[in-house]
């Protein structure tokens, strides 16, 4: 083998020369391209609902839902300033619709989950189906589905939006179409999708597609709580996760969206979980009780409505003190598993 030795000036001249041809030397970038472990600018961060809610209500005094199109405060990861991202692959924000307002109809190529945090029961209309938005419910908007949001109650409605905007942007596939009217026409009965698909009775000839979004437009918090309590009464809590159930497509068993996975867990009073880490950076929202998370040994205490983001491949422990805690989670695990890169590691103690 020839022993090649080249001085730095000659190499730099070579790099500059090939740059003009749209070329680059892999050996100068290899360690940044293929890292031994996940490397991201995403950092752990805690948003307190009380503080964010105050800012959101101030926004409600300054701009209408119709003028804003979506009155949302973006939850931007401090490690990725200017990105409009909560993780490298997901967007999150808190949306407000005040009494009497309508967030106008549109559709887009991005998929969305909406976790209702506050309000007595506003409506989302998804592809002509009116969907009641009760606290703790999960509302699903598949890609390219028409949707508008209406508040006919006497109190503000607030929810967490979780979308795959960065994923769609990465593929250069962003599209949006605005409706010809502020409100879309209601063409289905309330609860249509639940009657059609949520009862384990499928229409004759229906063929499930694991690569499409769930046909259900919403998942009831009451039903999720019942599933968690049933788990608590029949099986031991998982030492790392407590009791956890996943939101899924009832026709195929796959995740609710092709890009976003969602789950909800019960941490029983006194639960002290072992450390676990996974490659999907995850957004957590406490719905009931007080949940304590240790992310790489940094402590975060989450009250109802609080949001925590945990970066990819970060050790996390979760616990509950003197009362049960209910915690929602959302991540890009759905797409990671589809392309075969998702990984998890659990500590022994």
Image (cartoon, helix red, strand yellow):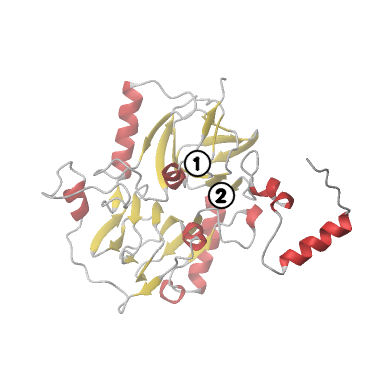
Total numbered circles: 2
Pick the quarter of the image with the C terminus.
Answer: top right
Numbered disc 1: secondary structure: loop
Q: Are marks 1 and 2 in contact (CB under 8 Å)?
A: no
Q: Residue at x 77, y 66 (%)?
A: 17
Pick the quarter of the image with the N terminus.
Answer: top right
Q: Which quarter of the figure has residue 15?
A: bottom right
Q: Residue at x 24, y 44 (%)?
A: 251
> Nearer the N terminus, badge 1 or badge 2?
2
Q: Residue at x 33, y 27 (%)?
A: 231
Horizontal side, residue 200 vs residue 291: left or right: left
Q: Residue at x 39, y 64 (%)?
A: 109
Point out residue 326 in the picture as x, y percentages from the top left corner: 43, 37
The answer to which of 33 and 183 lies nearer the viewer is 33
Point out residue 161 in the picture as x, y percentages from the top left corner: 44, 56
- Pointer 2: what residue? 48
The answer to which of 116 and 330 lies nearer the viewer is 330
Residue 118 appears in the rendering: no
- Pointer 1: what residue? 341
The answer to whether 75 is drawn above or below residue 348 in the figure is below
Numbered disc 2: secondary structure: loop
Residue 49 appears in the rendering: yes
Horizontal side, residue 110 vs residue 40: left or right: left
Q: Residues within 10 Å of mark 2 (few under 14, many from 20)?
A: some
Q: Residues within 10 Å of mark 1 (few under 14, many from 20)?
A: few
Q: Which quarter of the figure has residue 104?
A: bottom left
Point out residue 152 in the picture as x, y percentages from the top left corner: 30, 65
Marks 1 and 2, how far apart in space?
Answer: 32 Å
């Amino acid at each position: 083998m020839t022993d090649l030795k080249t001085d730095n000036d000659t190499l730099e001249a070579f790099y500059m020369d090939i740059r003009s041809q749209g070329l680059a030397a892999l050996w100068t970038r290899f360690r940044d391209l293929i890292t031994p472990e996940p490397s991201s600018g995403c950092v752990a961060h805690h948003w307190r609902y009380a503080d964010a809610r105050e800012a959101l209500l101030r926004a409600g005094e300054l701009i209408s839902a119709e003028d804003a199109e979506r009155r949302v405060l973006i939850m931007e990861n401090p490690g990725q300033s200017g990105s409009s991202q909560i993780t490298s692959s997901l967007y999150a924000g808190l949306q407000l619709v005040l009494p009497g307002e309508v967030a106008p109809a549109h559709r887009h190529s991005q998929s969305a989950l909406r976790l209702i945090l506050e309000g007595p029961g506003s409506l989302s209309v998804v592809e002509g189906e009116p969907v009641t938005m009760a606290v703790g419910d999960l509302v699903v908007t598949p890609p390219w589905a028409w949707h508008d949001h209406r508040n006919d109650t006497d109190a503000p409605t607030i929810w967490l939006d979780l979308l795959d905007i960065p994923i769609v942007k990465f593929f250069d596939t962003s599209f949006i179409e605005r409706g010809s009217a502020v409100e879309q026409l209601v063409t289905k009965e309330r609860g249509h999708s639940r009657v059609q698909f949520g009862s384990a009775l499928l229409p004759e000839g229906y063929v499930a597609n694991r690569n499409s979004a769930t046909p259900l437009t919403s998942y009831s918090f009451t039903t999720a709580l019942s599933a968690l309590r049933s788990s608590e009464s029949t099986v031991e809590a998982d030492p790392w996760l407590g009791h956890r159930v996943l939101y899924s497509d009832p026709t195929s068993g796959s995740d609710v969206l092709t890009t976003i996975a969602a789950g909800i867990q019960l941490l029983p009073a006194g639960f002290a979980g072992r450390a676990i880490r996974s490659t999907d950076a995850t957004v957590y929202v406490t719905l009931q009780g007080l949940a304590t998370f240790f992310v790489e040994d940094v402590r975060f205490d989450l009250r109802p409505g609080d949001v925590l983001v945990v970066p990819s491949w970060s050790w996390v422990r979760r616990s509950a003190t003197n009362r049960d805690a209910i915690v929602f989670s959302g991540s890009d695990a759905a797409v990671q598993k589809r392309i075969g890169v998702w990984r998890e590691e659990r500590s022994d103690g």
